[in-house]
Image (cartoon, rainbow, N blue to C red):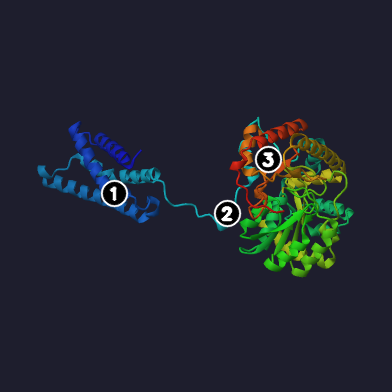
Amino acid sequence: MTVAERIHGDATAEVQVARSIGREQRTTGPALEADRRAVVDRHQKRTDFVMHEGPPIGANAGIVRAAADGAQQQVRENSAQHARARANQAPSAAVSPSTANLSSVLVLTSRRIIVNMAKARPSPNRLRLSAATSRVQSSAIRDLFGLLSRPEVISLAGGFPCVDAIDVDGLRDAAARAMRKSAAQALLYGSVQGHQPLRELIAERCRGYGTQLQAPDLLITSGSQQGIDLVARTMIDPGDTVAVEAPTYLGALQAFQAQGAKLVSVPTDADGLDVVALERIIEQHRPKLLYLIPNFANPTGAVLALRRRKPLLDLAQRYGVLLVEDDAYGELYFRDPPPPSLLSLATDDEREWVVHLSSFSKILAPGLRLAWIAAPAALMRHLWLAKQISDTHASATAQLVAFHFLNAGSLEPALSRARGYYAKQAMVMQRSIGAELGDIPLRAALIRGGMFHWLELPEVDTNALLQQAVQAGVAFVPGAPFFADGTGSNYLRLSFASATADQIGEGMRRLAQAIRTHDRRASVLQPTRR
């Protein structure tokens, strides 16, 4: 409805209200129309300020008040005129009851028109979002969710643990014990640092792997993503330089970009991060921290070679660069475990430059949203504060479930089950790649753990390929979002974690069909590097 239509409708309604009040004058037809036009004219004069492309009502409180004041003044003038006319008994000066009553409702009508105007005209004002919010781009994986809702599309995109790899019965029993033995703790607020008995069990497991930790060295977080975010918010100022692997986990890129970091990419190969190239980058860019996934990296599946780990620790201490070691996949090895963590290899002095992140999401259940950080004491105090500001503490109920699960000795059998499951899934996908894509030029590394296969298609833009693949009924994640510099458009990531063996085989057949029919002349490749 237009502004004029609102004025016309409100004025007519008020005339009819006035007629019902002033019963002694029962004029209709031309008289009613004349009265309505009079009200419209008065309203029009008071609302001219909204009839042009001027500032919105909401931004002009002064104008609104002026309109209301004018309406009230009109009521006073009409009331005085009516009183004088009755006192003088001058027929020519008489004011009809309907006109007097119309004046008495003018304030209400004016206010109603103002409200209607505010509803009718969208305000050009916009929410003033923070600079951090404006810097964040949507996740490529989250953007795929709309496509994946179609039942005919096989998803090889998201790296989501499969329920078949989770000890559901063991977790159900642990949840029952948590409610039976620890209900008060599970249902109330807890410690910012996390449930101490759980931290003690985690520290004990870490010591079994050669990492010397105690409960006070650990902070429980609501998933690894929050751990990355806490480190980013604690360490990074706008304009600071952060070094990342090329490619790397896109959730980490988002967290660093949100803080205004300048990202520099460090080349990788089959043995992980190139430490020689890293030293040149450190000398040139002086990054404040380096984020890396040393074990079965997302998205490449690469493992940082042992021969590179000690030199990396030396570089961090020598140049004062904080190492953020994200070990979300280290326990999902298929045959041989990866080398010891950077934290376990570090000397006491080098440990002052290492933050270690790990998670229950991949080894227990992602729905618990539990992970942990080990950090130097000087940094840990600030991480506690950032955590407190963020969400006070991780879910007390989830922590109690995890505690009772670990305390019952259930984690090791569950891990063995998960490793066997994902190893079979990885092998199914590897064979399908050979069978379905054998005649297509590509490079694929042998996967030894984790959840992903990483493919390089030298002649294909995978961003353009994705649309055709979804039409063929299969989804993957293009490579470019994993690169801080926007390269990598001829790579793609395939997840074997949650699809069935049959779905993996059929999905690879559909992907091969999409690649073969893809119009390569329409693909515009960007420069890539590893």
| Amino acid bearing label 2 | Thr
Q: Earlier in the sequence, mark 3 or mark 2?
A: 2
User: Can you identify the residue that label 1 sits on?
Assistant: 48
Count residues near mark 3 (Cα–Cα under 10 Å), then give few for <14, some for 14-19, many for 20+: many
Q: Do labels 1 and 3 touch, CB within 8 Å?
A: no
Tell which tag, 1 or 3, sits nearer the viewer.
3
Measured as percent of width and height from the top left, residue 167 is found at: 81, 38
Give how far apart the Cα atoms at labels 1 and 2 are: 39 Å
Q: What residue sits 15% from the left and 48% below the top?
A: 84
| Amino acid bearing label 3 | Phe
State the mark number for residue 133.
2
User: Can you identify the residue that label 3 sits on?
Assistant: 476
Residue 36 vs residue 343: left or right? left
Residue 205 vs residue 299: left or right? right
Give how far apart the Cα atoms at labels 3 and 2 are: 27 Å
The N terminus is located in which quarter?
top left
Count residues near mark 2 (Cα–Cα under 10 Å), then give few for <14, some for 14-19, many for 20+: few
Res. 251 in view? yes
- What SS does tag 1 mark? helix
| Amino acid bearing label 1 | Asp
Give how far apart the Cα atoms at labels 1 and 3 are: 57 Å
Measured as percent of width and height from the top left, residue 238 is found at: 61, 63
Q: Nearer the viewer, residue 145 or 101?
A: 145
